[in-house]
């Protein structure tokens, strides 16, 4: 598991986190390539099913990155996203999965450093948790063989 | 509407443990509105069940379908095309839907995925409260549109009990005393003299006291 490189899906709001990622790039701040960004018009667009499907298809971690609380371009999209992330966390807990595989993160468009730092921290957190249990189940027979 | 809440995940998983081909059936009516068993919840539960089986190294085949109304035979009939391919049916409808499927498909192993709660109204997004117990003899016309049967903890018919305190019910401060609400509304409408009229002891047979109820409309029957 030492060489485990997680696959992480980040749903990023067009108005903040996606722009912050762009800024990180402009400033030449590197962040782990493990993070695959999906741009959304608002994190309020991200439903619980999107997060679940990402996990179902093998993502080791998923986070939703929206605007700072109170700063949503559409007023309440980020608070709704947080509620949905919490719902998925509960489902994962009920299934015996680690709820820490999903997270809600808030940042503004100017926070390039924070975007990179978050990507790094989340990647490290998922490395500690290990691969998605779905992938673990797939990996197991191979390692035994 | 009829309100419902999803059952605990582990209870659902326990029901489905012996099966590998599941027909997961939602309903487009009440359980969609109260976000317990509509198309969206069907997708989410299917995904959760997939995650659970993948973790255990098992494969589970889930067919998702959401019927227009699970309590109506003409829509339940749509399951005919899928029922033979399923080891078990998991219904996300209220108890009426689950029983409609079990009645139509005698051989099918049918399980509920939700707990049916009550007939309620939406107070705000994500909040539902009981508003009707289906007593079969509606009193709202004499109680200013506030139901003492469903909203008074004791279903009292002639004013509050001694447990009312500062307008709240003794069971807890989150429950308003129904008779305080009735009195205030009667006053606001200027018809408080109605409060003086005694209601006779209620006949609870139409409320289910005489056994399972049925409505027969011969003018509609085919």
Image (cartoon, coloured by chain):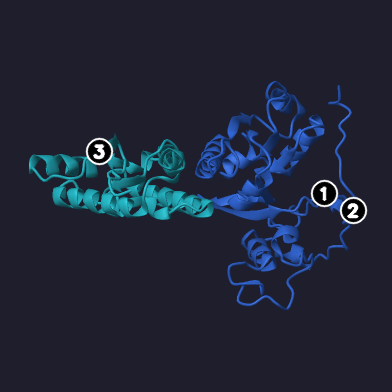
Mark 1: few/some/many CA within 10 Å (<14, 14-19, 20+): few
Q: Residue furthest right?
A: B210
Label 3 SS: loop
Label 1 SS: loop
Q: Colour in which chain B is shown? A: blue
Q: Chain of mark 3?
A: A
Residue A70 appearing in the image: no
Choose between B29 and A98: the one closer to the eye.
A98
- Between the residue at mark 2 and the residue at mark 1, the CA separation in whole angstroms equals 8 Å
Mark 3: few/some/many CA within 10 Å (<14, 14-19, 20+): many
Q: Which mark is residue B205?
A: 2
The mark lying in front, picked from 1 and 3, is 3
The mark lying in front, picked from 3 and 2, is 3
Q: Colour in which chain A is shown? A: cyan
Label 2 SS: helix
Q: Which residue is labeled 3 in the image?
A: A14
Residue for point 54% across, 44% down: B56
In the rendered image, the vertical position of residue A121 relative to residue B48, given as above or below: below
In the displayed structure image, the side of residue B5 where residue A92 appears, left or right: left
Q: Which residue is labeled 1 in the image?
A: B136
Q: Chain of mark 2?
A: B
Q: Position of residue B197 (x, y in %)?
A: 81, 65
- Between the residue at mark 3 and the residue at mark 2, the CA separation in whole angstroms equals 60 Å
- Between the residue at mark 1 and the residue at mark 3, the CA separation in whole angstroms equals 54 Å
Q: Position of residue B203 (x, y in %)?
A: 89, 57
Mark 2 or 1, nearer chain start:
1
Q: Position of residue B7 (x, y in %)?
A: 63, 51
């Amino acid at each position: 598991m030492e060489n485990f490189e997680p696959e992480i899906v980040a749903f990023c709001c067009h108005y903040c986190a996606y722009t912050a990622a762009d800024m990180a790039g402009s400033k030449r701040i590197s962040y782990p390539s493990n993070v695959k960004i999906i741009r959304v018009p608002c994190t309020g667009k991200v439903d619980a099913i999107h997060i679940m499907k990402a996990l179902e298809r093998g993502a080791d971690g998923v986070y939703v990155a929206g605007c700072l609380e109170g700063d949503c371009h559409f007023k309440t999209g980020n608070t709704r996203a947080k509620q949905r992330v919490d719902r998925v966390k509960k489902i994962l807990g009920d299934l015996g999965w680690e709820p820490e595989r999903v997270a809600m993160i808030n940042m503004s468009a100017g926070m390039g450093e924070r975007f990179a730092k978050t990507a790094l921290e989340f990647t490290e957190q998922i490395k500690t948790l290990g691969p998605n249990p779905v992938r673990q189940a797939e990996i197991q027979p191979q390692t035994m063989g | 509407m009829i309100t419902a809440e999803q059952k605990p995940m582990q209870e659902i998983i326990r029901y489905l443990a012996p099966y590998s081909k599941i027909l997961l059936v939602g309903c487009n009516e009440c359980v969609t509105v109260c976000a317990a068993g509509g198309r969206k919840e069907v997708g989410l539960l299917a995904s959760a069940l997939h995650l659970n089986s993948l973790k255990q190294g098992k494969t589970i085949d889930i067919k998702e379908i959401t019927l227009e109304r699970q309590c109506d035979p003409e829509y339940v009939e749509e399951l005919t095309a899928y029922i033979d391919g399923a080891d078990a049916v998991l219904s996300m409808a209220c108890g009426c839907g689950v029983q409609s499927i079990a009645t139509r498909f005698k051989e099918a192993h049918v399980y509920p995925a939700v707990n049916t709660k009550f007939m309620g109204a939406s107070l705000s997004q994500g909040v539902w409260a009981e508003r009707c117990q289906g007593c079969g003899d509606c009193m709202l016309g004499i109680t200013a549109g506030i139901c003492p049967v469903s909203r008074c903890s004791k279903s009292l018919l002639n004013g509050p009990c001694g447990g009312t305190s500062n307008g709240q019910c003794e069971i807890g401060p989150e429950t308003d005393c129904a008779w305080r609400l009735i009195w205030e509304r009667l006053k606001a409408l200027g018809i408080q003299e109605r409060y003086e009229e005694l209601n006779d002891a209620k006949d609870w047979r139409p409320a289910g006291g005489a056994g399972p109820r049925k409505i027969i409309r011969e003018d509609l029957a085919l």
